[in-house]
Image: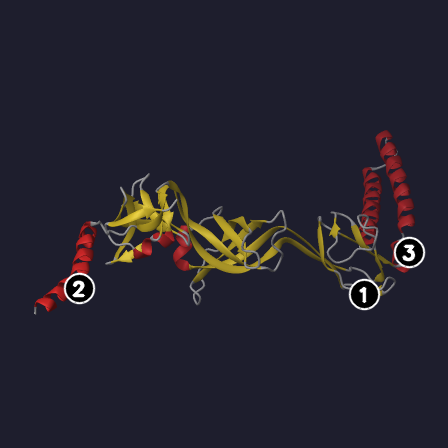
Amino acid sequence: MKQIRTILFALLTPWLLVTSCKQPDMEVDTTIEVPVGVIEVTTSTIEEFVSTTGSVYPLKEVTLSSEITGEYILQVNPSTGKRYALGDRVKADATVIKLEDEEYVNDLRIKSKEVDMEISKLEYEKQQSLFEKGGATLRELKNAEITLINTEYDIESSRINIEKMALDAPFSGIIADLPYFTNGTRIAASTEMIKIIDYGKLYLEANLPEKYFRNIDRGYKVYITSYTSTADTLTGIITQISPSIDPEARTFKCFVEVENRDEILLPGMFVKADLVVNSAEEVIVIPRDIIMSRNRNQIVYVVEKGVATERIITTGLQNEESVEVKMGLLKGESIVNSGFETLRNQSRVRILR
């Protein structure tokens, strides 16, 4: 029996020594610090939008058609040294196409009308001199004046008809359409010949829900973003607003003008338009994605002395990225913007630098 007690004592002694050595560790603080990122509460400007989509079109666009019958002659572009082609830039008043027709020119009798003009002018001056000396009646003077005026009209009419033989660009722009014809081909009148556009300015026709009718006005800002290049956002303004509501769609129409000096957008592109319906300056603004919903309240975590505390906030204007905070936060406080998903009220935190 004594031998058994000796063996048990020998076996238990190491266990007792190990256990006694571990006793002090039981008193170590085991509170876990959650790593989080923080940002300082600041004030800035926030804008609230109503979004819509649509296609943009050039503010200046013209299609020139032939006004007479004639032989098609495509002109040379001075900038390239080659005949005009799709995508070429043209300057205002530049002649792009000519229509040649000798019979048409002969029928205008320009030279004979110029001679008539000289004769009419001399006759009028003669009658005017005679009238001043009493050698001509007022009727004779007026008849000479009428003949002179009619001759001037004939000359002007011929000049206008001669101009119909040339298709000139009415403004500086780019050739957007140029149907192909072989030089010398006889073209009928009213044939579409060329389309010229200037898309330094574009317009967008937007249809908005009727509830926003009282929220927008002419001159309001609009942000235009292309779906093919979301990195480029242009600014436009509302230029026209329809005063009527579509009874079926419950929407109203407005037109947006977009500055496109760098030609980032192309005519016909499908775009997103964010129309500014409200804005506020020098208000507390925080990222939308750091706000959590708990017990029907909106909360964020405020960090002070290494502890994250839940803070109920009241929000105002908001958009896809930011939210205005009307109550609950003060400028200069630190709020958690990363790592908040695992936090609880009064959690100890370690701020990541």
Q: Nearer the viewer, mark 3 or mark 1?
A: 1
The kind of residue tagged 2 is: Leu
Task: Identify which residue is drawn at 57% across, 56% down.
Answer: 229
Pick whichever, 160 or 329, lies toward us.
329
Q: Are marks 2 and 1 in contact (CB under 8 Å)?
A: no
* Image location (x, y in percent) of residue 132: 84, 30
Residue 285: name its quadrant.
Answer: top left
Cα gap from disc 3 to disc 1, whole angstroms: 19 Å
Q: Which mark is residue 167?
A: none
Q: Which residue is mark 2?
A: 11
* Image location (x, y in percent) of residue 84: 79, 55
Q: How many marks?
A: 3
The kind of residue tagged 1 is: Ala
Q: Residues within 10 Å of mark 2 (few under 14, many from 20)?
A: few
Pick whichever, 242 or 26, lies toward us.
26
Can you name the residue that lies furthest to the left here? 1
The kind of residue tagged 3 is: Asn
Q: Is residue 228 left or right of residue 157?
A: left
Q: Secondary structure at mark 2?
A: helix
Q: Secondary structure at mark 1?
A: loop
Pick whichever, 277 or 5, lies toward us.
5
Q: Are marks 2 and 3 in contact (CB under 8 Å)?
A: no
The mark that comes first in sequence, 2 or 1, is 2
Task: Identify which residue is drawn at 90% across, 41% down.
Answer: 118
Instruction: Tell me if residue 130 comes above or below residue 160 in the rendering.
Output: above
Quarter placement of the C terminus: top left
Q: Residues within 10 Å of mark 1 (few under 14, many from 20)?
A: some
Q: Which residue is mark 3?
A: 106
Q: Which residue is mark 1?
A: 188
Task: Identify which residue is drawn at 34% across, 50% down.
Answer: 35
Pick whichever, 309 or 170, lies toward us.
309
Residue 148: name its quadrant.
Answer: top right
